Image (cartoon, grey):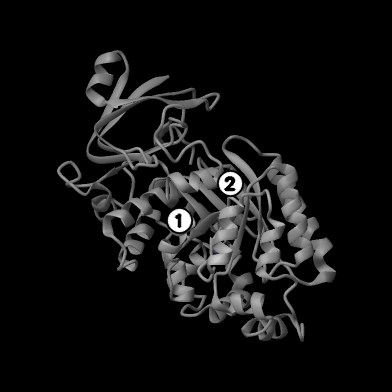
């Protein structure tokens, strides 16, 4: 089936941030095989004249752009409202350990609610960090395109075989459902919380299986102190919560990066990464994702985008989980970030924010969407955005005025009415 979709303004989300006014897309899809793609990009009027027999829809005062990708989200923490403490990383992490079990009870309704919110806010693709496997089934049965990062955590040398076995079980379960819509992947929680031997096994597995790999990295100053100087708050943390006295990190930051050769990993947060680390990440062909509101709540700082640019790294913006956010709406997230980065050039920042929820997360997740180009998947989002037609600063006005709920979302060329929610 072929059809034409157009809008007053199309953000192609290519490298130059091209904008097409009164643009149209010719797309095709086969609902049975999920085969779909964008065939042609032109102005709407000439497309409808060339193909008068096709169904055509045009959205006025609206922006059409690639459907959004939320590359770092924890659905399993969707129960949190006020259990967890904010303001500094140690208080937050301690509260997570204390309340983890309470937060995991009666989870299915909140996971479903957040899946629906992703779709309603224009997200077609997610990079879901799965710590326990509770989100696997709801995500398999959702319309979302999912990269499911099965996560391992644990630094007790005696438990490593058990932890790795548990990870393999979850990974195997995911592999049975592997498809173009659901991709099993792996996550190392972080170098402070995952033993070197376990992290090495997971990196090896990711390489061997050719799957995506994600890890939290240098999120807090306490983590930096621990990995670089083997002391500080984490010493007390391991003693208090795990009874390990005189604990030591099993690797430093650079040894961790050495493990990740040939995996093009997705590093999450990197708030305390210095030049040496960012240079190594760039050489690993890695990606850097941040979650600005989470970073504000736990660490009181934002990722340095100028520094990232210097190393030719492109920021990815994500929501993280409700464990460190008040909402998982990705449009609201970039709107908050826009006001957080008060000193950056407003127009450049607006473009970076939009590319950071479309083009770059798609590259990091290895999905053929995230850019409107011929041959790309027909994953598209249309947002009403009053005044966009006459705007002379369209990306900036989109960040300010786009409705936080999408008018229409196409996944594999199919609109909302065809999904089973
Ligand atoms: Zn996270």
Task: Tell me: 226 left or right of 65.
Answer: right
Q: Nearer the viewer, residue 109 or 386?
A: 386
The quarter of the rendering in which ligand 1 is drawn is bottom right
Q: Nearer the viewer, residue 37 or 169?
A: 37
Occupied quadrant, residue 334: bottom left
Instruction: Determine the residue positioned at 58% across, 62% down.
Output: 106
Occupied quadrant, residue 225: bottom right
Q: Marks 2 and 1, Cα distance to the nearest angstrom?
A: 19 Å
Where's residue 102, x and y in %? 60, 71
Task: Tell me: 4 left or right of 174.
Answer: left
Element at label 2: strand
Instruction: Determine the residue positioned at 41% across, 31% down.
Output: 373
Pick whichever of labels 2 and 1 is earlier in the sequence. Answer: 2
How packed mark 2 is, by other alpha carbons closer than 10 Å (few <14, some 14-19, many 20 or more), is many
Res. 315 mark: 1
Instruction: Determine the residue positioned at 53% across, 24% down.
Output: 32
Q: Nearer the viewer, residue 43 or 127?
A: 43
Q: Could you tell me if residue 325 is visible in this image?
A: no
């Amino acid at each position: 089936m072929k059809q034409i979709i157009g809008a007053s303004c199309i953000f192609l989300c290519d490298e130059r941030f091209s904008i097409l006014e009164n643009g149209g897309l010719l797309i095709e899809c086969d609902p049975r095989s999920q085969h779909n793609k964008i065939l042609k990009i032109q102005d709407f009027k000439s497309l409808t004249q060339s193909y008068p027999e096709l169904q055509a829809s045009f959205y006025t005062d609206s922006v059409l752009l690639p459907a959004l990708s939320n590359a770092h989200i924890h659905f399993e923490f969707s129960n949190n409202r006020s259990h967890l403490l904010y303001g500094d990383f140690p208080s937050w992490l301690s509260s997570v350990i204390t309340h983890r079990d309470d937060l995991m009870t009666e989870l299915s309704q909140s996971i479903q609610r957040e899946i629906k919110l992703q779709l309603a806010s224009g997200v077609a693709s997610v990079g879901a960090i799965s710590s326990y496997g509770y989100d696997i089934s709801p995500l398999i049965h959702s319309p979302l395109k999912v990269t499911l990062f099965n996560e391992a955590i644990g630094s007790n040398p005696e438990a490593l075989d058990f932890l790795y076995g548990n990870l393999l079980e979850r990974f195997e379960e995911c592999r049975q459902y592997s498809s173009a819509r659901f991709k099993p992947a792996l996550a190392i929680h972080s170098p402070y919380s995952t033993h070197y031997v376990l992290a090495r096994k997971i990196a090896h597995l990711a390489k061997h299986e050719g799957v995506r790999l994600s890890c939290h990295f240098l999120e807090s100053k306490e983590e930096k102190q621990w990995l670089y100087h083997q002391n500080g708050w984490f010493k007390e943390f391991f003693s208090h919560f795990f009874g390990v006295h005189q604990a030591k990190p099993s690797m430093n930051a650079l040894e961790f990066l050495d493990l990740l050769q040939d995996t093009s990993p997705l590093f999450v947060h990197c708030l305390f990464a210095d030049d040496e680390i960012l240079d190594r990440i760039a050489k690993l062909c890695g990606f850097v994702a941040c979650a600005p509101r989470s970073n504000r709540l736990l660490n009181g700082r934002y990722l340095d985008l100028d520094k990232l640019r210097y190393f030719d790294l492109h920021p990815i913006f994500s929501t993280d989980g409700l464990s460190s956010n008040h909402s998982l709406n990705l449009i609201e997230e970039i709107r908050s970030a826009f006001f957080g980065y008060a000193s950056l050039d407003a127009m450049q920042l607006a473009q970076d924010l939009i590319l950071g929820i479309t083009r770059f997360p798609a590259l990091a997740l290895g999905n053929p969407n995230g850019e409107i180009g011929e041959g790309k998947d027909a994953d598209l989002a249309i947002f009403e955005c009053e005044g966009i037609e006459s705007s002379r600063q369209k990306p900036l006005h989109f960040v300010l005025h786009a409705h936080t709920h999408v008018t229409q979302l196409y996944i594999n060329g199919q609109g909302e009415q065809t999904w089973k929610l």
